Image (cartoon, grey):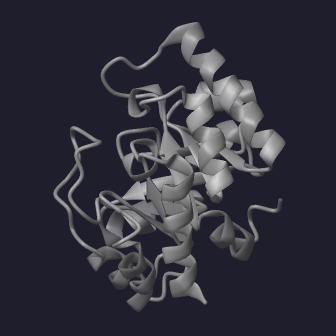
Amino acid sequence: MNIHNSDSLRNTLKVYFIMGSPNCKDNPAQVLQEAIKGGITLFQFREKGIGALTGDAKVELAKELQQICREQQISFIINDDINLAIALNSDGVHIGQEDDPVGEVRKKVGHDKIIGVSVHSYEEAMTALEGGADYFGIGPVFPTKTKEDAKPSNGTKLIEELRDREVYIPIVGIGGITAENAGSVIQAGADGVSVITAISHAESVTKAAEHLRKSVLNQRS
């Protein structure tokens, strides 16, 4: 996949599932397989929070989930851990404002990898764009309990501002997104939505992913 073809990346970002073992009620590999069956388009391995795996156990889980993604032709992104992303030759990384600058991360991972950056203001967005970001993660759009240090939710304001100012980089909304409110995020100008517990804590992971995909595609058609 040519990730620098932004149309291709826009499609990849539609239904973006983020998960690690602390987010799952069941075995993470099983949850991922069910989510792929339901129609997710991209997966990010984010092993953080209470009880998160570290060291070899984290690497082993990452490898297992990456293998599932490879078999199902789903891009596999790693959250924050640049060394792990390089070691596993992942499809890309997602970084926050507290991590290394985008330009430095780009030098480390190479030009054929996807780099997503969490941004919370126009200024942060411009810095990330200049550094070589491929897409922005913007949020929390709605209140969320998944991230303990999450900033206050800001609705779709920043997504709309970037589109009004003719910033056309692919954007994914994150934070408190469900099948019920995903449509408003796409209408605001996002290319996709990213969720954690809306899929991983659902009674039926496959059905939750299907519903989310429908609500995104209904807005885009």
Q: Tell me residue 3's x, y (percent).
A: 75, 61
When asked about the image quadrant of residue 131, the answer is bottom right
Residue 82 appears in the picture as rendered? no
- Is 151 on the left-hand or right-hand side of 85? left
Residue sticking out furthest to the top: 56
Identify the residue shown where x is 66% and y is 50%. 36
Q: Where, quadrant-wise, is the N terminus in this rendering?
A: bottom right
Q: Tell me residue 158's x, y (percent).
A: 31, 75
Front residue of 31/196: it is 31
Q: Where, quadrant-wise, is the C terminus in this rendering?
A: bottom right
**In the depicted structure, whether residue 121 falls above or below residue 17:** below
- Is 100 on the left-hand or right-hand side of 181? right
When asked about the image quadrant of residue 68, the answer is top right
Identify the residue shown where x is 73% and y is 50%. 74
Q: Tell me residue 52's x, y (percent).
A: 40, 20
Front residue of 66/203: it is 203
Identify the residue shown where x is 30% and y is 76%. 156
- Is 99 on the left-hand or right-hand side of 216? left
**In the depicted structure, whether residue 210 falls above or below residue 151:** below
Identify the residue shown where x is 39% and y is 27%. 22
